[in-house]
Amino acid sequence: MVYIHPTHERADPVNNLKKRQLDLSRHLSVEAKARLPNPIKAIWKVAQVKPGTINMGNGDPHHTLYPVCEMNFIVPSVSESDPVQAWRAGTGDQQIIASYKDEPCALSLRTALAYGAGAGLKHVRDALAELNDRIHAPPKHMVSLSLGNADALTKCYRLLGDPGDSFLCEEFTFSAMTNAALPLGIKWVPIRMDKDGLIPSDMEKILANWDETLQGKRPHVLYTIPCSQNPTGSTLSAERRRQIYDLAHEYDIIILEDDPYFFLQYDLDIQTTTIESYGYTRAMADVLPRSFLSMDYDGRVMRLDSFSKILAPGMRLGWVTCNDFFAEKLDMLTDSSSQHPHGLGQAFISELLGGEGWGIDGFMKWVSSLCREYQRRRDLFMDVFRREVESSGLASAETPKSGMFVWIKINVERHPRYRKSEKLDKPGAPVTNTADLMNELFRKLLDCGLVMMPASTFAIVDQTGRIPTDGHITDRVNFFRATFVGTDEVIEDGLKIFARGLEEFFCY
Ligand SMILES: Cc1ncc(COP(=O)(O)O)c(C=O)c1O
């Protein structure tokens, strides 16, 4: 584990005092409390402290017998003014990222390919701690590596969740990850959303009215996707983030900040003068949204970052940033399960972010160039959408500020077979046939050769896999999630099919 230097501690002494005294142990699951450290890793850590120690204790293959001595990757050079465009066009310079077993480099393959600690190797964690520090300036947090946010999230659930616990989340969310918590006996409590994401007043209403005798233990975890919320594409404003953090503080909630789209922000006002004077990292840090981590004086935020969306999903590398108490427990779980992430990925990242590679500033230059390209695709998507689809009045969408998703609203009430019952079966029960019509439309589009993700896929389900019929969610599943990351042809062709399918479905 690596400390991010507490250089940015808040001046507020009361808050700093609270931060030091906060006992977070009540949030740990029974499993996390019962877990013993991996005794072999514990000895390994002690042995690491003293250089020159002869290690005859471990079952590590000897490095002279590793069948590899060098690893080369050809990557784009970030000396180009717009490296992503130059890379796509094949016109830009390239650069070799090299790792060696016996030659000097940022992270020797001798170390990278050996067994390591669950938190990952210090070289990589140091680089990511520096990146964190320059972007979020968190008051005192640790960095541990993960195999991406899916791995990190499932470990966080096990760290914090007991059977019967209720966790809060957005009412439409990344169901792959919320479903992963259900077998652990965790129940999800959906918070209402609008076009700007999670509504803080609804979160407050849930927490303030929680009745432990009827509903069980009050939720102590919030799972949220603050940027390009998957599936709705919404990005929380600074004001909402502050309100949510304050509520978390008031009701003692741990925030799982799942933020794989954080770096993909659009319409950013990046200042050339700041780039010239301080580099890309500072220029980007000035305009990126303020994360929950950056406001975390209590140590109640577990932030999950991933290389999946900014390098490649097959990297299977990410990083968790959290307080030292949770970091230690998380590392214990990793030490006794998946163990540390793969050495080749760690070697590649060390070299890429190191002095002979892009460096952190070059990496941020790549990211800002990536933002420009995705912004171009988003704009194309929205232009074609407004022209081909929205003009019919059958669907509409907000322009997303970040990420990869557009949340398309279907004006289902215009369908000739749309029904709205005047008579309520019971309070909160569905009153329309929206879910059935959306199901039909999904199949119709599939027949036309187009897949869009129906909103019902992202609605919270109970332990049996069913969407609860109270709370009107089935009346509000009239959305599709579409992504704009594809090529120009995919965007043009896909949206034309969508427009035609919609018009046929609505019998125009
Ligand atoms: C919100 C969200 N969380 C987590 C993940 C999984 O990310 P990773 O590839 O880092 O495991 C995704 C991937 O699509 C996602 O959208």
Image: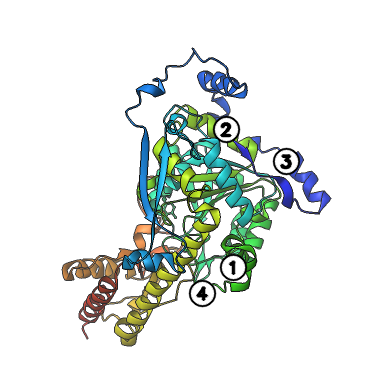
Please name the residue that numbered disc 1 is placed on: 237
Which quadrant does the N terminus fall into? top right
- Residue 249, percent across and down? 69, 51
Residue density around tag 4, few if under 14, some if 14–19, many if 20 or more, within 10 Å: few
Identify the residue position indicated by label 4 in the image.
Answer: 267
Q: Secondary structure at mark 1?
A: loop
Looking at the image, residue 325 lies above or below residue 291: above
Compute the Cα span from label 2 to label 4. 39 Å
Residue in view at x 75 percent, y 41 percent: 20
Residue 227 on image: x %, y %: 51, 62
Report how far apart the C-alphas of labels 3 and 1 lie in the structure.
Answer: 27 Å
Q: Which mark is residue 81?
A: none
Name the kind of residue labelled 1 in the image: Ser
In which quarter of the view is residue 419 placed? bottom left
Q: Position of residue 277 (x, y in %)?
A: 65, 66
User: Nearer the observer, disc 1 or disc 4?
Assistant: 4
